Amino acid sequence: MTYGRHSEKMENPGQLSLLDNSFTEPEQTGNQSEEISESQTAVPVKRHRRTRSEIISEGLPVEETTIKREDDHREHGHQLIPIGKHFVRKVIHMIPGKLFVEIINEETYKCVDCEKLDGCSHLYHGKAPQALIAHSIATPSLIAEILNQKYVLGTPIYRQLKEWQRAGVLLSETTITNWIIKCVATVKPLYDLLHQRLIEQRFLQGDETPYEVLREPNKPARSKSYIWVIRSISRSDKPIVYYVYGDTRSGKFAQKIYQHFTGVLQCDGYAGYNFLTDSITRAGCWAHVRRKFYDDANKVCGHFKETRPLAILNKMFRLEKQWSKLSSSERLDRRSKSLKPLIDSFWQWCDQAEALPKSRLGKALIYAQNQRKALNQILNFGEIDLSNNASERNMKSYVIGRKNWLFSTSPKGAEANAIWMSWIESAKANGLTPFKYLQDIIEKISKLPVFMKTEELEAYLPWNWQDENKPSIPAKMAVAKRPTDPK
C-alpha cells in the first residue's frame, strides 16, 4: 500500500508548497470551507508587511536606554552640553523564568502586661494564609506554569521534569500529576458556573473525539472514552470553550451535558445527538457535506474532477467568507437572496442523482439527505456559521495535546485535562494570557470560603476577569490569525 499526502486542498498544479501542513491543518474537514476549485485561477496577493507597532504589543513594559559619550569634551578640550537624543533602534529582550524560595513565618507576640498580672506568658502570632495543597511546596504560579507547559505548549509532564531539575527543583511525575488533579477541586465550582453560563446562551456548537483512559472502571484498557466540547458561537459576547470527559459516546451522555439548553446546536451528523430533547434545534455542518463530495471528486488519485455539487458548495463557502463581517441580520438577508438558490440547486441535483449506496458518491448523498433539515437551518439563523469548524478547531487543540500526553491513567486525570483545557481555551478566546489567568484564579479562588456564592465567582469568569498588574493586551495582538477551517 502506498502512503502519501492526503488533503482536500485544490491547488494550482503549477505551484509547489515549501511546507507540509499535515500537522497544523485541522483534523477532518481540512481547508475545504475556504478553498477554490481547480478550474479557477489563483491570483497572487501581496501580503501586508507588518509595521513595528503591529508586531510589538502596547502592553509590554518599556525600558529606555540612552548611550552617552565616553568623553564629554571635544578633541581640543571644549565642553559638550547635552541637547537631546536621537532614536537608533527598538529591540526585544527575554528574561527567562526564575524560581525563588519563599520562607513563610508567623511573627510571634506576647503581652507583657498580662504576664505581670498572672505570671503566665500570653503568646499571639500572625495567621498565614492556607497552603494551596497541604504539606506541599506548590504555589499558584508554579502550578500555572506546569499547566501552561502541558496544555498551551503541549509539553507532557515527563518532558518537563528535566527543565524543572535544571531550574533547581527535583520533582517526580507522580507529584506533578497529583498537584494537577488536586488543584481541580479549587476551580471546579467555577467550571460548573462556566457550563451554566454556556447553556444559557441561545446558539452553541458541539463536537467529540475519542480518548484513551487506562484504568476505566469495568472497561478494558484499550477501550474508547471520549472528550466532548461545547462552545459558544464566534459572534458571542461571552466566548466559552467547555470540554467534558465522558466514558461513553452515547446519546444519554449528550442529554446530560446539554440538559437545560433550549437553543440552536450546530453539530455533525452523529446519531447520539438525536437523543436531545425537542427544545433543541439541530443545525448541520456544510463542511462535512462538502468533504464527502470532495472525496468523490478525488476518488481517482491524481485525477481530481470537480463535480456539480462540489462546485455549488465551493461557491456557498466563498459567499460566506465575503459576508463574515456583516451583522447577523444582514448575513441572513444575503443568505435568503444569494445562498438559498444555491442550496435549492444542490438539493435538486441530489434528488435526481443515482449512485450505489456504498460508493463515495452514494455515501455523500446519504449523509446530505439525512442531514437535510439540519443543514437548511442555516437559512433561518444569521448568527450561526456555515460550518461547525470553530468547535472543531478547539477539538484540534485537544488532539494536538493528546498526541503528546497520549492517554490518561485514570478518569480523574481525564477529567482534570478537560477542566484545565476549558480554562485555557476560554482564556484564549477572550484574549487573555492563559498563564496569568490560571495563576490568578487558582490563587484567589483558593482563598474564598468553602461554600462560595455565585456572585463571588462571577468576577473570575474569563470575560469579567481583569489583570490587576498589567494593562490588557490590545485586541489586535490578542486575537491570533484565524486558522484554516477544520474537520
Image: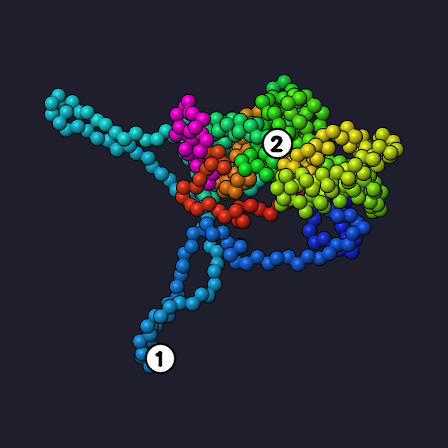
Q: Nearer the viewer, residue 460 or 78?
A: 460
Quadrant holding the N terminus: top right
Q: Is 480 drawn above or below residue 386 in the view shown?
A: below
Q: Nearer the viewer, mark 1 or mark 2?
A: 2
477 drawn magenta: no
At 41% from the left and 41% from the top, the residue drawn is 468
**Position in image of residue 131 (x %, y %):** 38, 30
- Mark 2 is on which residue type? Leu
Location of residue 426 by image quarter: top right
At 61% from the left and 42% from the top, the residue drawn is 327
- Residue designated by label 1: 75
Cβ–Cβ under 8 Å for marks 1 and 2: no
Location of residue 277 by image quarter: top right
At 40% from the left and 28% from the top, the residue drawn is 448
Q: Specify which label sits upstream in the sequence, 1 or 2.
A: 1
**Position in image of residue 17 (x %, y %):** 72, 53
Q: Is 9 drawn above or below residue 189 in the view shown?
A: below
Q: Residue furthest bottom?
A: 76
- Residue designated by label 2: 204
445 drawn magenta: yes
Q: Secondary structure at mark 1?
A: loop
- Mark 1 is on which residue type? Glu
Cα distance in 3D space between marks 1 and 2: 75 Å
Q: Which residues are magenta?
A: 436-459
Quadrant holding the C terminus: top right
Q: Secondary structure at mark 2?
A: strand
State left or right for residue 276 relative to residue 56: right
Q: Nearer the viewer, residue 163 or 318?
A: 318
Q: Is residue 238 visible in this depiction of the protein?
A: yes
At 46% from the left and 31% from the top, the residue drawn is 458
Badge count: 2
**Position in image of residue 216 (x %, y %):** 61, 22
